[in-house]
Amino acid sequence: MSRQNQKALVLLSGGQDSTTCLHWAIREFGRDAVTAISFDYGQRHRIELECAAAVAEDAGVAHVCLPIDTFNALGGDALTESAIEVEGAIDDRTGLPNTFVPGRNLVFLTYAAAYAWQRDVPNLVTGVAQTDYSGYPDCREETIKALQQALRLGMESEVTIHTPLMHLSKKETVELARDLGALDAMALTHTCYNGTRPPCGQCPACRLRAKGFEEAGVSDPLVADV
């Protein structure tokens, strides 16, 4: 079956990668077949959700935000606790960045799959990448493949998880956004771990984003006028 005859649900955080994936899904499935989903998980920077809504509106697709606050209750990471600094610190116990929210992508995709199952949507699209994945184990291809199989078994479905950025560097992700005509949308996105707008330019997420745009020889619309 042609992808143009199928529906797709895009996990949209409001960031660079998920925005690129949203425009990829529009190209692959058609704008009318695409819905975006975001999660209010108690993240310390609410601007993420504002940006996700703005990106979806700009793209002309429906957008839903689901509340799941358990991650905030669990705590222990720099993305849900304001007392924890995000400047590239590594957790001594796990060896992972302190911005890693354990289980986040697994939970997001499971909720998204449940939402999609209720609406006969067979395709999920997510912006995880193991090339520039900041050390997060739930961004690896083997993790996503295993989860897809578990979802298929657990929901008696043929859900497919698409990861168009999985093997792309940040440079290549910028180039893909350009080719998709999504560069203007980057001005609406949010990447900064410190939650500032304009972005701080110093946190790991800001540095990785800047590196990608620089290597691609493309001006980042988010900071072009700053």
Image: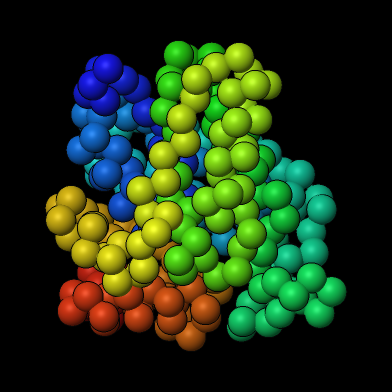
User: In the displayed structure, does residue 168 sit left or right of residue 114?
Assistant: left
Rendered image quadrant of residue 123: top left
Which colour assignment does the render follow? rainbow
Is residue 60 among the parts visible in the rendering? no
Q: Residue at x 48, y 73 (%)?
A: 205
* Residue positioned 36% across, 68% down in the render: 169
Count numbered badges in the picture. Answer: 0
Q: Is residue 187 above or below residue 83?
A: above
Q: Is residue 155 left or right of residue 159?
A: right
Along the viewing direction, whichever of 120 and 83 lies nearer the viewer: 120
Residue 75 visible in the snapshot: yes
Kindly identify the residue that appears in the image at 26 percent across and 80 percent down. 215
Question: In x, y percent, where is residue 99?
Answer: 65, 68
Question: Residue at image x 36%, y 48%?
Answer: 164
Which quarter shows the N terminus?
top left
Q: Horizontal and vertical percent for residue 172?
A: 28, 66
Q: Residue 36, image x and y in percent?
A: 40, 35
191 vs 92: above or below: above
The quarter of the rendered structure image containing the C terminus is: bottom left
Frontmost residue, 33 versus 193: 33
